[in-house]
């Protein structure tokens, strides 16, 4: 009987902890904005080549959490951090860890498309140029590969020198994804990337996310629970700065472990 229980426990554990490497692990991670305790004792692991969705009501700490993963959150002067955030096994909160290097590995796409007021071409080569790539042939290859990766190439290949502001909102967001791919990241953070897009553009970005996870690990904040259910492998539910539940998306949406998760996903609050 005992051995059955032990085996069952292991099976439950392995449901989430499948045999893949973790890209990120949070260990007792805490964050304060001044006196405001915005993230509380977060223990969490994010597997590679998966889509991890972060859901929860407004103000629960979703954006704060993903902005911690590339240390962007530290741009807020009042921020205090405690605990550990491991990227590929190294604690990124360690003073010795280079933020620049981290940001070449962990790219980010924001809620509102934010292309630079430059040509489509210049937007994509911006990051590689900063990293010292000058060879025109290599830059051209990066542009084609990144735009293809972001499912935008066919729509823009004949207008690469036009200003990015001339693209539609959905195209601009895919350009921002291409700009992110151009630095060859390992992880892509997406903070509500479709909330400013129409349904067709949203669908394109969702399909793209499914393709991108073959090569990258994706962490996506979304207010849209149907979207989390459609595109993610695992889902984390945050509430008031706490990680309430983290599970396979199919399990969380069909049979949540915690009553608060159930209340949220069935629309009783939020
Ligand atoms: N720069 C800041 N200074 C002070 N408090 C902040 C700051 N940014 C966020 N907060 C607070 O931290 C908490 C978490 O905010 P966060 O933006 O991470 O929530 P969220 O879940 O992403 O919300 P939303 O879904 O509305 O974007 C909130 O109470 C918010 O008011």
Image (tube, rainbow, N blue to C red):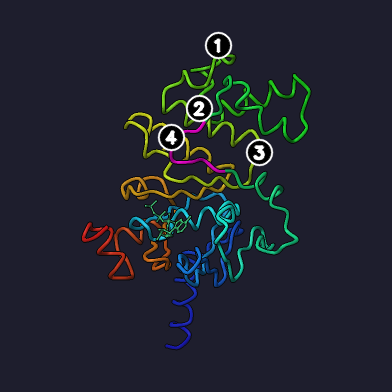
Quick check: 224 above or below 256? above
Q: Residue 139 in the image: x percent, y percent?
A: 71, 24
Q: Secondary structure at mark 1?
A: loop
Q: Residue 33 in the image: x percent, y percent?
A: 50, 63
Is 170 placed left or right of 181 in the picture? left
Is 236 placed left or right of 99 in the picture? left
Depth check, front residue: 184 or 211: 184
Distance from the alpha carbon under mark 1 to that under mark 2: 15 Å
Distance from the alpha carbon under mark 4 to that under mark 1: 22 Å
Q: Secondary structure at mark 4?
A: helix
Distance from the alpha carbon under mark 4 to that under mark 2: 9 Å
Q: Residue at x 54, y 58 (%)?
A: 46
Depth check, front residue: 105 or 4: 105
In the picture of the structure, the residue carrying the numbered disc 2 is 151
Mark 4 vs 1, N-terminal side:
1
* Residue 252, image quadrant: bottom left
Quick check: 120 above or below 33? above
In the picture of the structure, the residue carrying the numbered disc 4 is 205
In the picture of the structure, the residue carrying the numbered disc 3 is 184
In the picture of the structure, the residue carrying the numbered disc 1 is 158
Quick check: 111 above or below 18? above
């Amino acid at each position: 009987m005992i051995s059955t229980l032990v085996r069952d426990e292991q099976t439950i554990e392995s449901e989430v902890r499948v045999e893949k490497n973790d890209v990120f692990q949070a260990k007792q991670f805490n964050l304060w904005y001044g006196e405001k305790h915005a993230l509380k004792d977060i223990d969490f692991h994010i597997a590679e080549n998966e889509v991890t969705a972060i859901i929860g009501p407004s103000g629960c700490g979703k954006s704060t959490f993903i902005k911690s993963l590339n240390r962007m959150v530290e741009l807020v002067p009042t921020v205090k951090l405690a605990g550990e955030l491991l990227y590929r096994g190294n604690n990124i909160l360690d003073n010795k860890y280079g933020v620049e290097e981290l940001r070449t590995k962990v790219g980010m796409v924001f809620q509102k498309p934010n292309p630079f007021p430059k040509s489509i071409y210049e937007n994509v080569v911006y990051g590689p140029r900063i990293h010292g790539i000058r060879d025109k042939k290599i830059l051209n290859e990066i542009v084609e590969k990144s735009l293809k990766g972001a499912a935008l190439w066919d729509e823009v290949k004949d207008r690469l020198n036009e200003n990015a502001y001339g693209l539609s909102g959905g195209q601009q967001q895919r350009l921002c994804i291409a700009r992110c791919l151009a630095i060859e990241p390992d992880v892509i953070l997406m903070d509500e990337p479709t909330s400013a897009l129409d349904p067709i553009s949203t669908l394109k970005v969702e399909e793209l996310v499914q393709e991108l996870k073959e090569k990258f690990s994706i962490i996506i904040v979304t207010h849209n629970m149907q979207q989390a259910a459609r595109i993610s492998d695992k889902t984390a539910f945050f509430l008031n700065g706490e990680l309430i539940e983290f599970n396979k998306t199919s399990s969380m949406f069909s049979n949540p472990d915690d009553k608060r998760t159930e209340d949220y996903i069935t629309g009783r609050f939020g």
